[in-house]
Image (cartoon, rainbow, N blue to C red):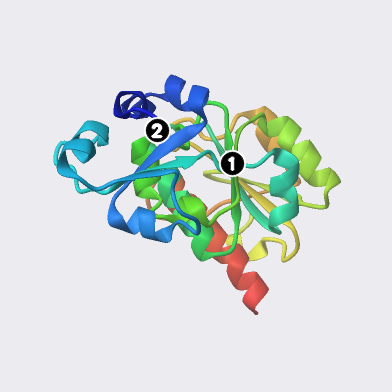
Amino acid sequence: MISLKRLAKLKQKKYRERERRFLAEGALLVREAPYPPEHLFEDEASVRRLSSLTTPSGPVAVFPFLDLSQEELLRCRDRLALLHGVQDPGNVGTVIRSAHAFGAGVALSRGCADLYNPKTVRATMGSIFRVPLAREVEPPEFLRRAREAGFAPVAAVAAGGASPGSLPAGRLVIVVGSEGSGLPEEVVSACETSVTIPAEAHSLNAAVAASILLYAAYSRVLT
């Protein structure tokens, strides 16, 4: 039996990477998992030790890493969101929830919030177990592979792009950057086209933009 002291270290990324395990806290997260955890703690003392919350809710479960290789992700879904440099765990988790709702997968570039950060995991509301995910990808290389696999990469830009209604109905990668920095030119140029969400605000945060575009792509399939 692995010690509670060792499991508590999973709150830190370096130990998660070493163990290839992560913590999931809360009844909803544990219930959404399609398979039982490696360990489950429900007693108050253990939950307090493992929780990253000021007021722990429990239970806390330990699961193995579940991300896929880039090649596996490209085989799993016809619609993907690629997040570039999105550092807020809440935004990353929200995009994963939207991908679950709209039948897509998610790839995270280097520099994104850690997929297994407790804040990211909580923000997915259990969708982390339901969405095919890849992480630490290099966007230009990932987009090259995606194009070879028949995907059309589309960059989300603040201005000058086509309307969301023009998104291709086939295999698609929607590329979204952080609200502050957007997408670097090398990533935009690696895409076949760009899209702009018409809005009165100067910009939308990454989670809102990605969610709108994922829905737009999903609705194209429905019609």
| Residue 87 picture quarter | top left
Give the residue pinned by disc 2: 1
Residue at 39% across, 30% down: 2
Q: Secondary structure at mark 2?
A: loop
Residue 118 location (% of width, % of height) = 35, 37
From what the image shows, is residue 35 above or below residue 158? below
Q: Nearer the viewer, residue 143 or 70?
A: 70
Compared across the picture, whether 4 is left or right of 114 comes to left
Q: Nearer the viewer, residue 65 or 91?
A: 65
Type of amino acid at the residue the image marks with label 2: Met
Name the image quarter holding the N terminus.
Answer: top left
Characterize the local packing of mark 1: few (<14), some (14-19) or many (20 or more) Cα atoms within 10 angstroms: some
Q: Nearer the viewer, residue 141 or 128?
A: 128
Characterize the local packing of mark 2: few (<14), some (14-19) or many (20 or more) Cα atoms within 10 angstroms: few
Residue at 62% across, 63% down: 217
Type of amino acid at the residue the image marks with label 1: Asp
Q: Nearer the viewer, residue 107 or 193?
A: 107
Compared across the picture, whether 140 is left or right of 135 comes to right
Q: What residue occupies the far right of the structure in this picture?
A: 148
Residue 13 location (% of width, % of height) = 43, 24
Q: Quick check: can you spot residue 1? A: yes
Residue at 75% across, 31% down: 141
Residue 96 location (% of width, % of height) = 48, 51
From what the image shows, is residue 174 above or below residue 50? below
Q: Secondary structure at mark 1?
A: loop
Q: Earlier in the sequence, mark 1 or mark 2?
A: 2
Give the residue pinned by disc 1: 67
Compared across the picture, whether 175 is left or right of 20 comes to right
Residue at 85% across, 44% down: 148
Residue 35 location (% of width, % of height) = 50, 56
